[in-house]
Image (spheres, helix red, strand yellow):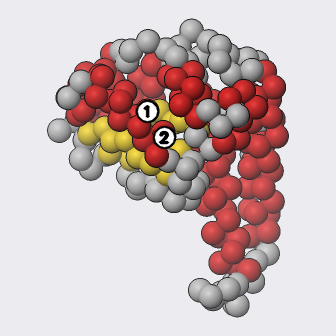
Amino acid sequence: MDPKPLKYTSLEGLSEKQLKEHHDVLYAGYVKKTNEIREALKTADTAGANATYSQLGELKREETFALNGVKLHEGYFDNMAADGGGEPTGAIRQWIEEDFGSVAKFLDDFRATGMAARGWVILAFDLDEGKLRTYLCDSHNQGGVWNSVALLIMDVYEHAYFIDYATGRKAYIEAFMKLIDWDEVNSIAEKFNLGQYRK
């Protein structure tokens, strides 16, 4: 697995230094560790597998942490664009209005979840319910919901904004909201043909 390149070098509200550290160091580190873990799993001791402690158990646990770190960061970086921002469009707007009551209520919920979370905010489509949900994930491998498709991902770990905003998470969230690529969000929904699951 190789790191995906960024589509941009800087964005309004996120400096080149902030993005470079986040992408080239942190995200690339998750890719590297995922590769290392997968290599180690090829020769892991399966005979000594144990729930309290075993090499296999620790590798499997850390695989979910590292790999989700890769996937969440890729979604986060893909969800932003220099010409992003504004209000949701297309099918996503319609679904937001139906599932949250209004675009304003969704945006308020997404921002508030960002203030409450330790790690991630994810707007996901639940394939079983056929609805959009906002999820809070405190860690890469905590808070994810099975059988859901992540559409919009916001990183709220301090590393995502500290260079530009210090501890000013609220200002960072506002900057992120102005960068959301709603065309990308709609394109993910189309890629997975999510309309067929609407209820």
Numbered circle sitting on residue 111:
1
- Image x and y of residue 5, in percent: 74, 28
> Mark 2–mark 1 contact, CB under 8 Å?
yes
Which secondary structure, mark 2?
A: helix
Residue at 65 percent of width and 37 percent of height? 167
- The image shows residue 194, relative to residue 31, as above or below, that is above
Examine the rendering and report whether any part of residue 38 can be seen.
Answer: yes
Closer to the camera in the image, 159 or 70: 159
Closer to the camera in the image, 116 or 132: 116
Which secondary structure, mark 1?
A: helix
Examine the rendering and report whether any part of residue 23 can be seen.
Answer: no
Drawn side of residue 14 relative to residue 83, left or right: right
Quadrant of res 10: top right
Residue at 62 percent of width and 32 percent of height? 168
Quadrant of res 193: top left
- The image shows residue 96, relative to residue 122, as above or below, that is above
Residue to which mark 2 is pinned = 115
Residue type at tag 1: Arg
- Image x and y of residue 17, in percent: 81, 25
Instruction: State the count of labels.
Output: 2
- The image shows residue 68, relative to residue 181, as above or below, that is below
- Image x and y of residue 140, in percent: 58, 54
Mark 1 surroundings: few (<14), some (14-19) or many (≥20) residues within 10 A: some
Residue at 52 percent of width and 23 percent of height? 174
Mark 2 surroundings: few (<14), some (14-19) or many (≥20) residues within 10 A: some
- Image x and y of residue 22, in percent: 74, 36
Residue at 69 percent of width and 75 percent of height? 58
Residue type at tag 2: Met
